[in-house]
Amino acid sequence: MAGIEITPHTFFFLLSTILTLGGAIGVVNNRNLVRGSIWLIVSLFGVAGYFVLLHAPFLAAVQVLVYIGAIGILITFAVMLTRGMTQLQRRFSSLWWLGASASLLLFIVLLFTVIEPIWGDLSAVPDAPPGSTTDLGIALVSGDGFVLPFEVAAVLLTAAMIGAIVLAREARNADE
Amino acid sequence: MERRDIVTALESLLRDTLGFGSELSLFIATILGVVIIATVPLLVIIGLIWGDRKFGSRVQDRLGPNRVGPFGLLQSFADLGKLLTKEDITPANADRLIYNVAPVLSVASVILVWAVIPMAPNVVGVDLETGVLYIIAVASLGTLAVVMGGWASNNKYALLGGFRAVAALVSYEIPMVMALLVPVLFLGTGSLVEIVEAQANMWFVALSPIAALTFFLASQAEVGRPPFDLIEAESELTAGYNVEYSGMKFGMFMAGEYAHWLTQGVLLAVLFFGGWNGPFVDRWPWLGIFYFFIKSLILFFASDLVRFTIPRLRIDQMMHFNWQWLVPLSIVNLLVTALLLKIIQELGFAVDLANSPGFVDTLPMTIIMLAGNALQVAVVLSIIRFRGKRQRLMAAAGN
């Protein structure tokens, strides 16, 4: 394992990896679901660290804002409302083999499609930022860029939001 | 103008005066910079707790702390000693890990915000291009601390306080973010350093008073100050999410809370009131720190005045106010601002705010923006008038 130099960069990579993987192990290994959701937040925080290392501060901030600030808190909140889920008796569900094989399959796919082609080839990793946040913003709304997918996603999210409101609304009496 | 942050300034200082190697001086400078940035708000808070109490007492026709030291100045230190020597109690059946992490997270979430705040020319922790987004992201960690503390205490009042906190903080985040986007819209960047520099001759509060007001109201709720302090309504929840905490763990929640209050004033000053800008700053840059804290403290005490005069709302009134008034208003304001900026551009009145233009150059743009804001205020007032009239008529018909 010679040739790995300890620079601040590798140190923070190691830290992010420990947070991400450690948090993930905490999620699946915990019998208390509230703690599990806190570990999930730790894991997502580690992923935000990767984005910082990859010169993508915008994605890092969005990761923290959306995944920790919104989704993480929502999951924590939902779990807290269900007291029964804080004291699970069994560590493994009866479907554990399905989950294990699905994640193994995903790992193999990632290994051969993403990791293997660039393994050891450091030139594939960009040294400088490929573009600034301004470039990203312009690409999202310019006619040559991604304005159509952007708008489609926006419409989809709006529809989902309206649907959620309609579902959550109390049924009113017909005569009202 | 060359921009520098605290770390590079400290690094060159260490290298030139003490003759350290460049790697060593960068290492020391980074740690020193982090320590300085993290310490400033905490030091200010110690004085601020006294000022806040004294000011609040005067508002409510009381004397306030006046026994410990001259004018009660040492009261905060006496309280600190009390908090440090108190017994540290962890309730039975509490989730110890989460219970102990929550106060730390509460302080950390607000200290992290200070990393991107420019306190004077070249005095900033780090100049992030996505600074505004960073603030929102980091501030959302504070919500998590409240939820964790409320749940881990194993106390129903604490849990209820935590639930209220989530409902309130998540809702009021929307108008706050919409208001934060307005300065970003003016400049096309989220960098707080550039936002402050652009306000050299014209504060953004003149360009968009509605955004400043919605930010003030939403952040008032976001930091849990009256009339929006439902999170810790003593009469309903004893003390809310921190009811089980004692000693320094409670102290950390309290410090985090005061830091949030100070940060509210600081963010308002930076985003809408020109930050460190003021007379003679270009000649003596250190004056910037003075202006920065003066503005922040004036805004802090303005929010304090609201806190000590207006009674607490009910939770449903608070949610109504947000979803029926603040959220629509902030969204409309954002759209109107974007539209007006385009119109100003077409009319040829547009000035490049990034180059900190003169007062007179910015005037046409300011007048158009102000007119747009006045129109929105007129619409809001007429809606209020119409609703009030209808309610009065219905009440009269009922009788």
Image: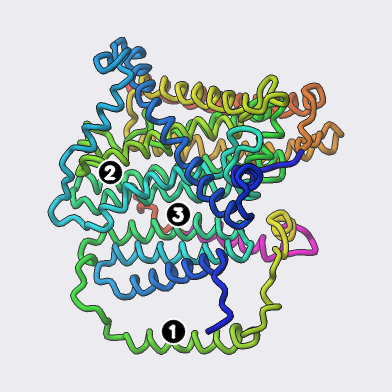
The image shows a total of numbered marks equal to: 3
Q: Position of residue B98 (x, y in %)?
A: 28, 56
Residue farthest along the front direction in this orientation:
B19
Q: Which three-letter amino acid code belongs to the residue tagged 2?
A: Gly
Secondary structure under badge 3?
A: helix
- Residue placed most toward the observer, B26 or B375: B26
For badge 1, the amino acid type reads Ser
Q: Could you tell me how far apart the alpha carbons at marks 3 and 2 are, in whole angstroms?
A: 18 Å
Asked where in the image residue B308 lies, by quadrant, the reply is top left
The amino acid type of the residue labelled 3 equals Gly
Give the number of the disc on residue A103: 1
Say if mark 1 contacts mark 3, CB within 8 Å: no
Rounded to the nearest whole Å, what is the CA distance between mark 1 and mark 3? 26 Å
Q: Which of the colour schemes (rainbow, by chain, secondary structure, one colour) is used?
A: rainbow
Q: Residue furthest right?
A: B348
Q: Report the residue marked by disc 2.
A: B161
At horizontal 54% and vertical 39% (from top left) the residue drawn is: B328
Quadrant that contains the C terminus of chain A: top left
Q: Which residues are magenta?
A: A141-163
Going by the image, does A30 lie left or right of B379? left
| Residue at 69 percent of width and 30 percent of height | B199
Residue B220 lies in quadrant: top left
Q: Is residue B319 left or right of residue A35?
A: right
Would residue B9 appear left or right of A67 to someone viewing this image? right
Q: Nearer the viewer, residue B155 or B228?
A: B155
**Alpha-carbon span between mark 2 and mark 1:** 39 Å
Seen in the picture, residue B73 relative to A93 is either above or below; the reply is: above
Which is more N-terminal, label 3 or label 1? 3
Residue under circle 3?
A69
Query: Which is nearer the eye, A145 or B351?
Result: B351
